[in-house]
Amino acid sequence: MKAQARTGVPPMALPVDFRLEDFLPYRLAVAASRVSRMCSRRYSEAYGLTIPEWRVLATIGRFGTLSPSAVTEWTAMDKVKVSRAAASLVARGLVRQMPDPNDGRGRRLRLTRKGTMVHQGVVPLAQELETILAGGLSRWEWSVLNKTLTRLNLHLQNIDGPDQGDELD
């Protein structure tokens, strides 16, 4: 009776063979968290960047001048994280924020010279980290993992809609 009161589920209905460590969403979250911590340490040690800052910097570095909402879409981070990361990058002189000429209320972000230099240094670091991760798998496994993650993300977009923000940072 106490189990039912706490969970709302009769005790006999609870699955006895459920193992959290075998549950795919849990396993993906743990792997993503470990990868994120490893990257975070390296980006912080080398450039003083957080993961959200790195994602914003990398996205602006790839596309040039972008609105914060475009950065939000490309990074799959929520608006608040993008705003905070962008503000930090502006304060550090890595990103310049300017008015959007097409929208009086809008803003555009672009890398400064200093930001471009950091971007040019951090991209090889990111590639090195990916190589380290790939080192734990065969080439075939790495290829299958990448294709599978792409298909899984497309499937998730179909069933759950577009990304609403990343909660792993």
Image (cartoon, rainbow, N blue to C red):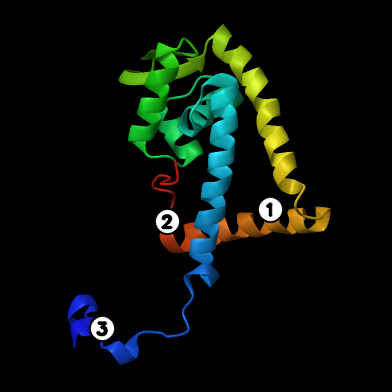
Question: Which numbered mark, 2 or 3, is in the foreground of this view?
Answer: 3
Task: Identify which amino acid the numbered label 2 is placed on.
Answer: Gly
Question: Which numbered mark, 2 or 1, is in the foreground of this view?
Answer: 1
- 3D distance between C-alphas at marks 2 and 3: 30 Å
Q: Which mark is residue 9?
A: 3
Pointer 2 or 1: first along the chain: 1
Q: Residues within 10 Å of mark 2 (few under 14, many from 20)?
A: few
* 32 or 140, nearer to the observer: 32
Determine whether label 2 and label 3 are within 8 Å by CB: no
Q: Position of residue 12 (x, y in %)?
A: 32, 92
- 3D distance between C-alphas at marks 2 and 1: 21 Å
Write down the residue under mark 1. 146
SS of the residue at dot 1? helix
* 54 or 78, nearer to the observer: 54
Query: Horizontally, is 51 left or right of 91 in the view?
Result: right
Q: Is residue 19 above or below residue 40?
A: below
What's the residue at 45%, 64% (across, down)?
Answer: 159
Q: Residues within 10 Å of mark 1 (few under 14, many from 20)?
A: few
Pointer 2 or 3: first along the chain: 3
SS of the residue at dot 2? loop
Q: Position of residue 37 (x, y in %)?
A: 53, 41
Determine whether label 1 and label 3 are within 8 Å by CB: no
Task: Identify which amino acid the numbered label 1 is placed on.
Answer: Asn
Quadrant containing the N terminus in the rendered view: bottom left
What's the residue at 50%, 37% (across, down)?
Answer: 74
SS of the residue at dot 3? loop
What's the residue at 68%, 53% (across, down)?
Answer: 146
* Residue closest to the far right: 139
